[in-house]
Amino acid sequence: MNNQVNDSIKEIMSIIVIAFILSMALRTWVIEGRIVPTGSMLPTIQLQDRLMVNKLIYHFRDPRRGEVVVFRPPDALHAKDDYVKRVVGLPGDKIEIRNGQLYIDDQTQDEPYIAESMEYNFGPVVVPKNSYFMMGDNRNHSFDSHQWGVWLTRDHLIGKAFVIYWPISQIGLL
């Protein structure tokens, strides 16, 4: 009887250890939950929403315009927290903001997800190789590429945010 109890305890402990190791590996390399700390992505993502982030995707393909991405800010910003923004400009894109409208390669962009028209002008600039131009959906209240003075390089990308999982009323794909 005592051996059975010991064997059961050993089995339960090994299951707990394996589950812990697997969860840490998944969180480190595959998928991770994040809390949104600011309102820079309003109205798409609310303050304190919880997101799932696919950390594996950009090992197999490049980011695409319009994707919501979690990334470490450029080193020159000396920020400690990761950012959540939308990919607006890809390498080689000419970016300009004028008259409240985003232009990419001199073409106006349809952006139904933004909070309001931009109240500033920017550019034109050309996104360098291996870099991205990131903007929050709350354009007039987002600290993003148009203010940084530095480029976000690919090595700063953490992953693609793909779903809001909390609060329940906000559950949905991004």
Image: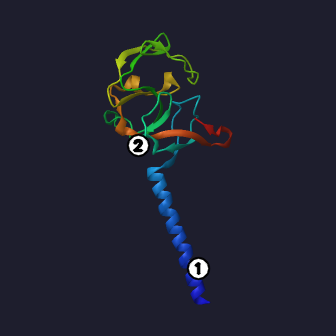
Q: Is residue 73 left or right of residue 36?
A: left
Residue at 65% of width from left, 38% of height from top? 170
Q: Which of these two is toward me, 123 or 88?
A: 88
* Position of residue 59 measured from the top left corner of the image (x, y, whole percent): 41, 43
Residue 26 visible somewhere in the drawing: yes
Within-10-Å neighbours for mark 1: few <14, some 14–19, many 20+: few
* Position of residue 167 measured from the top left corner of the image (x, y, whole percent): 64, 42
The quadrant holding residue 63 is: top left
The label number, if any, that marks residue 59 in the structure image: 2
- For mark 2, give the secondary structure: helix
> Which quarter of the rendering shows the N terminus?
bottom right
Going by the numbered disc 1, the residue's amino acid type is Ser
Residue at 51% of width from left, 72% of height from top? 14
Residue at 48% of width from left, 9% of height from top? 99
* Position of residue 70 measured from the top left corner of the image (x, y, whole percent): 46, 38
Q: Is residue 129 left or right of residue 70?
A: left
Q: Point out the residue furthest to the top here.
A: 99
Q: Earlier in the sequence, mark 2 or mark 1?
A: 1
Q: Point out the residue furthest to the bottom here.
A: 1
Circle nearer the viewer, 2 or 1: 2
Q: Which residue is mark 1?
A: 8
Q: Which of these two is toward me, 118 or 69?
A: 69
CA gap, disc 2 and disc 1 = 41 Å
Q: Is residue 163 left or right of residue 88?
A: right
The quadrant holding residue 166 is: top right
- For mark 1, give the secondary structure: helix
